[in-house]
Image (tube, helix red, strand yellow):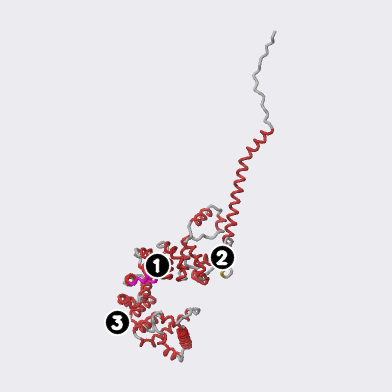
Amino acid sequence: MRRWRRRCKTSPPKRQPSRGNQKMNELNSNAPRKRVLKRRLVILSLVLLAVVGLVVWLTGGFNHEPLHKGKPISYWVDRACTYDGTGEDGTDATERCREVKTIGPTAVPYLVARLRTSNWWGSKWLWLRARLPAGIQQSFSDTRSADEIRYGAARTLSLFGADAKPAVPDLARLLPRIPHPVIDALAAIGPGAREALPVLHATLTNQDVSLRVEVATALWHIGRETNLVLRIGTNALVPGTSDGAAMNASYLLSLLRSAAAPAVPFALNVLRDTNRSPDTRANAASVLGAARVSSPEIRAALLDGTRVEQPEILRSNCAMALWRLDSEFAPFATRVVLEHSIALKRQFPQSEQDFTAWLETRDLDPNESIPTLKRLLESDSSDMRKEAGSALERIEAKSKEGTNQ
């Protein structure tokens, strides 16, 4: 007989994984951890590279620039590329610009590069800094905007005159966004900035009187656009315009010399207007002298401006305007101009006043002042004797230069 056996349902025996499979499972379980570690190492490496690159860039390691006073030109240029005012080191922006000017034309390409400054890196840095801990954020100084850098570069280029001609295309591209320093720089470049004339004309659509006078000044220095300059300058002398606009317009009109004759009635009103500043009235007097338009009314107004109680700048400009109208005023004007020079030296001891340059910019012949200067060598005032002697020396030196040429 076959014996019946009850079969019990049993689960199949568990198969033990092989040693190779055990190792594979261990590797798979560790894989995410290794990926995270690897990613962190990559990020850390990139951060270190960025820091090293920044340090090398700041120290000028990527290029071998010419040095000025032991430091790369970029160092001095970057110091100058700020807005007006005093920097963290206590130096004035004008001082920093003048320091770059002493480098010479070699600095121009570096300034042009600053005109092309982009906002891209600055915005990225601000985004990154905002995500750093507060304590770390405070350790970084505020980043200058691209507009601030461009502003400072244009202002510095205005000191280079015609040497800044390579900057004309980049300066023109900044109009009308950054008008004032750009217009000044183009005016200083002069005829070499003709490429910028179309954009300057387009800027005249702005109805701001002061800005229009600035543009007109540039148009005069670049293209000698007499009629347009005369119209804009004269409109700035009407009652109600700002004192600054009238001051700059008067100076501009004085450059036109006899072509400024149509503006004489307006300049005469500005000279008589005691609500205007002494500087503005003085510039208006220069317009009267430059235009060579004489009348009893004009002479009376100029003589009134030379009274002792009037500000020195007004007295001096009125006296020189009278001299331009009639050489008989040369002795009187010579003394008044020297008195102004003495007053300036007392106020600004470090300033250098050039008597002959003052006269020559107004088409006056310094030789006409020689008899008066010789008499003033016997003056009771030591300051007057000193100034008269200095003026005679300058006239003699100029005369020798002309003879040698």
Q: Residue furthest front?
A: 405
Residue type pointed to by label 1: Arg
Instruction: Measure the alpha-carbon separation of dots 2 and 1.
Output: 31 Å
Residue type pointed to by label 2: Glu
Element type where label 1 sits in the image: helix
Quarter of the image with the N terminus is: top right
Instruction: Measure the alpha-carbon separation of dots 3 and 1.
Output: 41 Å
Instruction: Specify whether residue 109 is in view.
Output: yes
Name above or below for residue 66 compared with residue 126: below
Mark 3 or mark 2, which has the lower sequence index? 2
Residue type pointed to by label 3: Glu
Estimate how packed mark 2 is, as few (under 14), some (14 to 19) or many (20 or more) residues with alpha carbons within 10 Å. few
Judging by the rendered image, the residue that carries numbered circle 1 is: 194
Q: Check contact, mark 3 vs mark 2: CB within 8 A.
A: no
Judging by the rendered image, the residue that carries numbered circle 2 is: 65
Kindly identify the residue that appears in the image at 36 percent across and 83 percent down.
Answer: 324
Name above or below for residue 92 compared with residue 117: below
Element type where label 2 sits in the image: loop
**Residue 5 horizontal/vertical position (percent):** 68, 13
Mark 2 or mark 1, which has the lower sequence index? 2
What residue span does the magenta drawing correspond to?
219-226
Mark 3 or mark 1, which has the lower sequence index? 1
Kindly identify the residue that appears in the image at 42 percent across and 87 percent down.
Answer: 367
Q: Check contact, mark 3 vs mark 1: CB within 8 A.
A: no
Judging by the rendered image, the residue that carries numbered circle 3 is: 297
| Res 294 quadrant in image | bottom left
